[in-house]
Image (tube, rainbow, N blue to C red):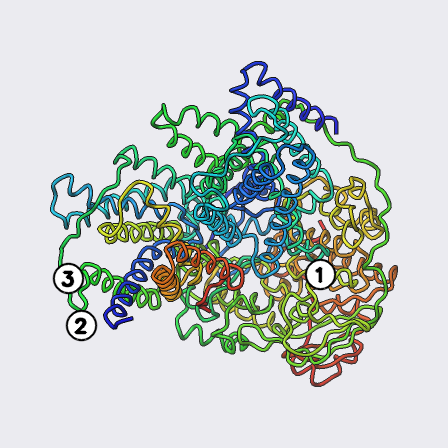
Amino acid sequence: MTLQLEAITGGYGDTLVHRDLSLALPAGQITAIVGRNGTGKTTLARLIAGELPLQGGAIRLAGYEIGGLPAHARARRGIVTMPQTGMVFDTLSVRENLHLTGGTPDQIARIAQTFPRLGERMAQRAGSMSGGERKILGFARAMLGNGKVLVLDEPSEGVQPENIQRMQAEITARKAAGAAILLLEQNVSMIVSIADRVHALDTKGFTFTLERADIAREAVLAALEI
Amino acid sequence: MSSDALVLFALNATWQIAALALLALGLGLVFGLLRIMNMAHGDFVMLGAYAPVLTAQWGLPPLAAIPVCLLMVGLTALIVERLVIRHLYARMFDSLLATWALSILMREGAELAFGPQFRNVPLPFEGVTQIGTVGYPSYRLLVIGLVAAGFLALWLWYRRSLTGLKLRAMVDNPTLAEGAGINTARLSAGAFVAGCLLAGLAGLLLAPTLSVYPGMGLDALIRSFFTLIVGGLGTLEGLAVGAAVIGGLQAGLSAYLSQTAGYLGVLILAILFLWRRPDGLYRHR
Amino acid sequence: MGSIVTVNLALAAGLLLVPWLGGDFLAWQIGLFLLYGVAAQGVGFAWGRGGFLPLGNALFFGLGAYGAAAVLKATEGALWVNLAAMALIALLCAALAFGIALLLFRGRMGSGPGFSLVTLALVLIAAQIAETTPALTGGFNGFSGYPPLAGLDPFGGLYPVIVALVVAVTLSLTLIERLPAGLILRGLVAQEERLELLGFAPHRVKAWAFAGSAGIGALAGSLYASHQGIVTPQAIGFMLSAELVIWAAVGGRFSPLGPLLGAVAIGWASSALRDTVAWWEVGVAAVFLLVVLLQPGGAMDLIHRGIARLGLTRRRRDAPPLPAPPSRAAAARGPLRLCDVGLSAGGIRILDRLSLALPEAGILCVIGPNGAGKTTMLNAVTARLPVQSGQITLGAVSLGGKATWQMLDHGIARKMQIPTVFGALTLRENLQLAALAGRMRGLDALRPSPLRWQTPPVARLLADPEVPLAAGLDKDAGHLPQGHRQFLELAMTLSPEPRLVMLDEPAAGMSPAETQLMVRLARDYQQQTGAAIVVIEHDMHLVDALADEVAVLHQGRTLATGSLAEVRRDPLVAAVYAGGHK
C-alpha cells in the first residue's frame, strides 16, 4: 500500500519542525531520507506513527485518511515503526517482544535463524542485552507481523556490519513482498546498497531527490552536507 | 498455650492476612500495572463499605449491596480516570499528589453526603463454624475462602492471558506499545477501574468487621502500603507473601506485647524493607 | 543581587507591618502559619530543588518543638543558652536527616516513592511514640509548663523573631539557587547519571539537601514551642506532614517564597473558615488537585510568569569567564588493566575472564560483534555494574569496590552510548557543571565565582567554528538533536581534562562530516593532553582514522589486539567480524 503525506505540519507543541511537507512512499519501494542532525527525520517518523499530533495536512494510506487516528489504530492498519531509541520492551523477554508484534511461531523461528544472536537469547530480558543487540531485536520486531508501511529510524546505528548486511536482506525481502519502506539513516553504504529513491532534507523541507540510477556514495554525501 | 488457643490464634492470623491481602489487592494492581501510587485507594474502600449502609437505608435486600457497590465505585473510578489519572500516567509524584488531593476530596465529600458519624454494618449472616473444639464466625471463614480463590483465579489469568503481556508492555514502554497496536488509553483505564473496584469490594466484604466512617480510608491505605512494600511492589505472589508477613507480625506482636508494639513492628519492618530490599521479599524476574 | 535584597526587604517590611495594621492577635495567628510556612519551605527545597519528596517532614518540626520545649523548661529563660540549644537541636535534626538520606540513597533507592514512604513511616513511628510515652512527651495532653523563649510574649515580642527567621530562611534559599550548590541540585534532578560521571556523589548531594530541609523544619518547630506554649503529638504527626506538602505544592515548590505563601494563605484562611463554610475542605482539596493537574509550579510560577510578561525581569549579565583551577582528574596515574574480569547479569555471562591492558597514552579502539561485552567492559570499569571476579587496576591502585562518582577523581571520564546531558538545563549551565567537575573543593559550592570557571578543553571546543555548540548556549540541552547532544556530552566529558577517556560509540547518529569532526576532536585532545582514550566503534573508517591500537572482543573475552591491519589479518577475527563502514 502506498503512504502519502500531503502538506503535513507538525512538531513539538508550538515548535513546528515540519511545515507543509509532502512525500510519497510507494508500495514495493525503499525510500530513504538523508539530512544532517536536527532536520527532523525522527520527528517525521513520529508524525507518521501518530506519536505526535498532526497540526496540518493529511496522511493517506492507500487513499484512506489516517492522519487523525491514534497511534494504535495506525499500527493496526499496518504502519509499523522502529524508533531510534526505546525500540524494545526492556522488561519483557526477547520472545515476548517478538510475540507482541503479532509474529507467528514460524515467523519468530525464521527471524531467529536470520539473527542467531536472538535465537540464542529468546528467554533473556531485552533490557539486559547490549545496545546493538537491542537494535537488532527492535528491527526484528518491525519485520514481523504484516506491516504494510515500515518506518525505520536509524536501524543500523551501533550494529555490527554482518548484521547490517542481514538487515538489508530482510528489508529487500519485505520490499519484494510489496511493503512501502521509509529508511532514515546516516549510514551511506546502507542507503547506496538498497534505496530506490533518496530525498535530501534540510530544515526548510526537501531540497532534491535522487532516483535509483543516481544513487552513489558521493551524491548522497553531497545531500548530507547541505 | 493450649491447643484451642493455638487454633484460635492461627485462625485470627489467617483472617488478618486474608483481610490485608484483600485490602492491598487493588492498590497493588494499580501500582503494579500503571505505576500509580493511588493515595485515594483507601477512600474507594470507604466508598465500598458504605454500600451496605446505603442499601439498608434504602430498604433494599442485603445482596443488593453488591451491585450498589460496583456501580458507585465503578462510576467514581471511571470519572476519576477520565478527569485526573489519564493525564498523569508516567508522572509518579504528580499522580501521588493528585490522588492524595482526590483522597481528601472523597473523604470530605463523604462527610458531607453521609455525615461524620460511625456506622455499624451487621453481618449478612450470623453463624459459627466449629473447627475441632473452636468456634469461628462463618462469615470470616467465607471471606478467607473467597480471598484465596480470588487470588488463585487472578494469578492464573494474569499468567496466561495476552492482556497480561500487553499490560506489562504498556507499563514498560507506552509509546512502543501504542506502536504495536495496543490501545493504551483503554487498557490503562480498564486497569485503574478494576483496581478501584477491587478496593470497593474489599470495603464491602470487610464492612461488617470494621467501623464505617468517612475517614476510614487512611488506615486502609497505610496498611495496604506496608503490605505492598514487604511483598514487593507489583506481583500477586509478592502481595500474598507481604500480607502473610505483615498480618502475621501484627497478629503475633499484638497478641504477645501490645497493639502499639504490633503497629511499630510493622512500621519498622517496612522501613527495613524499603531500605535493604526495595523490591520486597518476592521478585518477579 | 539587587532584586534578592529588594524582595527580602519588602517581605520583612510587609510582615512587620502586620501587628501595626491588624493587631497583635492577627500577628499571633499569622505567626503560626509563618512557622508552618518555613517548615513548608524546607519541604519545597527538598522536593522542588532536590527532586525527592519527603512525606514526613513534621518529624523534624516536631523534634524541634519537643526539643525546644524541653530546653526551655530546663534552662528557664537564659536567652543565649536557649538560642544556642535551639540551634544545636536544629543541627542535630539536620545531622539525623543527613544520616537517614545517606543510608537510604547510597543503596539502590532512587528519588522515587521509596524514600517518600520511609519518611512517612518514620513520622508515623514518631507520632506513635509521642502519643504513647506520656512520661517523655506528655502524651495526648501535650508537653507544657515551660516559659517562652527569653520570656518573649507570644502575642508581642516573639513575632519579630519569627519574621527574622522567615527572612533568614528565604534569603538563604534564594542565594543557594544562584550558587554552584543550586546548579548541582538542578543537575541532580535533570540527569543523575551524568552528574555522577562528573564526580559528584548523588547520595551526598541529596543528603545535604535533605539535611537543609530538616534543619529548617526544626528551627521553625523550636519557635513553634514558644509560640504555642504547648507541644502535642499533632506537631509531629502525619497530618501536618501532609499539609506541609500541600502548601508547598499550591504555593509553588520551585520558589523559596512559594511554600510560605501557600502556608499563610491556605492555612490561615482554613483556620478562619473551616468551621463556618461546610464546603471549605472540599474546596481546598479541589484547588490542590487542580494545581497538581494544571499548574505544577504552583501560585509562584503564575506570579513569576506574570512578572516576566510585564517585562520586569532583568537579563542577567554574563560575567567574564575565569580560568578554572587545575583538575584532580588530570594527574597521571598509570595505565588501566583488566585482569580476568568476570561479570554476569540476568543469568547471562557477559564478561568471561576478560583481560585487557590499555596503553598509558594513545587511542585504543575496541571492536567486536554485538553482544561481545564492549559497553559492559566500560560499565565494569566505571562501577556501573558490579564485577564478580578478577581485578581492575589503574597504575598501582585497584578500582575494585569504588563507586561511579569516584572515577573522575581517578582521572576516568566517560561518554555514554546514548548521550546523557542535563536536558532541563541550558547548554551554558551544562558546561558550568562540567567546569566544576574534578576542580571544586571545600566551600566552592557556596561561592559564586566557580560558576564563571572556564576549562581549557571547553574553551577550545567553543572556539572551534565547526563545533555546533557556541551558537545556542542559552537553549535547553533537552531540545538538541541526538548528534549535537553527542558534542555537548563530549565537551562535558573532556572538560575535567581526564587522563583516561572512554567514548562509547561517539559517532552514533552522526553524518559522515560530523563523524570526521568527532575524530579530529578526539585526536586533538589526545595530542594536547597525552591522555589515553578508549573508543568503542563499528565504523571502520573511524577506527582507521583514530586507532593507535585495536582490541577485538568476542563473547566477553579479548580475541586479538594489535594494529588495525594486524587484527584484520587474524583468521580468528575474520571468522567472527568482518567490519564495514558507514
* The C terminus of chain C, quarter of image: bottom right
Taking the spot 70% from the left edge, 28% from the top edge, the residue there is: C4
Position in image of residue C65 (x %, y %): 55, 39
Q: CA distance from mark 2 to mark 3?
A: 12 Å
Q: Residue under mark 2: which chain is it in?
A: B
In the rendered image, which residue does mark 2 sit on? B132
Taking the spot 49% from the left edge, 61% from the top edge, the residue there is: B273
Q: Is residue A202 visible?
A: no
Query: Left or right of C165: which side holds B158?
Result: left
Label 1 with label 2: CB-CB less than 8 Å: no
Taking the spot 73% from the left edge, 61% from the top edge, the residue there is: C406
Position in image of residue C539 (x %, y %): 70, 67
Farthest bottom residue?
C571
Asked if labels 3 and 1 share a chain, the reply is no
Q: Residue under mark 1: which chain is it in?
A: C
In the rendered image, which residue does mark 3 sit on? B128
Label 2 with label 3: CB-CB less than 8 Å: no
Position in image of residue B234 (x %, y %): 42, 60
Give me the disc on residue C506: 1
Q: Secondary structure at mark 1?
A: loop
Q: CA distance from mark 1 to mark 2?
A: 74 Å
Give the residue type that dot 1 points to: Pro
Give the residue type that dot 3 points to: Val
| On screen, residue C172 above or below C392 | above
Query: Left or right of A138: which side holds C213?
Result: right
